[in-house]
Image (cartoon, grey):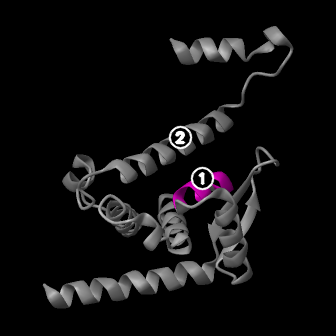
Amino acid sequence: MPIEKDREEASDDDGQRPRNEPQLEAIRREVQRLAEMLDALNGDDPSALDDIEAASPISFEQGRAAEAARMYKERRLRDQFLPSNLFADPAWDMLLDLYKAHYRRSDVSICSLCLASCVPTTTAHRWIDTMEDAKLFKRTCDQRDRRRVFIELTEGARLAMDRYFDRLALIRNEGA
């Protein structure tokens, strides 16, 4: 099995410690997040839910995460039909990504957030700094690897996003 072989190669044979299982799990989650982001960029139907999600009842947290993911997919879909440079809104893309991650209880690295913004890395870093100065984002160190930094919404930003999605639901229900 390839994973077992990788573990053996990472063990004491070369004098290094074996990889820590929590670190491997964190890497798996990050890869899954990036795969979902790529799917969102390439998907043709932004309103389509996964079969599993559609078949089972969802919690408030799952619903909010799914709504943020749907909105992000819709924004990326627009790029397939109109020039994307006309509609760049990295701050909103980052807010949606962090909001979704909050309710999925997943960590978002700076690198991942830069990818979610769909702008050059230097531009994304400036936006992260701007959002942090505005008290919407906060940085936290990875407890397992102090070299990595995660970004998350502040409590005030999350509450503002909750109110936004509450109001959005009311508007959509009025039109139904």
Marks 2/1: CA distance?
Answer: 10 Å
Asked if one can make out residue 79 in the rendered structure from this viewpoint, the answer is: yes
Q: Quadrant of residue 6?
A: top right
What's the residue at 56%, 54% (across, down)? 115
Q: Is residue 131 above or below residue 112?
A: below
Question: Element at badge 2?
Answer: helix
Magenta run includes residue 28: no
Q: Total marks drawn? A: 2
What's the residue at 61%, 38% (across, down)? 27
Q: Residues within 10 Å of mark 2 (few under 14, many from 20)?
A: few
What's the residue at 58%, 81% (across, down)? 157
Residue that mark 1 sits on: 112
Q: Is residue 7 above or below residue 61?
A: above
What's the residue at 48%, 58% (across, down)? 104
Would residue 60 be found to the left or right of residue 16 on screen? left
Decide which of 161, 113 is in the foreground and name it.
113
Asked if one can make out residue 106 in the rendered structure from this viewpoint, the answer is: no
Q: At which x and y percent is residue 40? A: 37, 53
Q: At which x and y percent is residue 133? A: 74, 81
Kind of residue at badge 1: Ser
Q: At which x and y percent is residue 44? A: 25, 52
Question: Element at badge 1?
Answer: helix
Q: Which is nearer the N-term, disc 2 or disc 1?
A: 2
Q: Residues within 10 Å of mark 1 (few under 14, many from 20)?
A: some
Residue that mark 2 sits on: 31
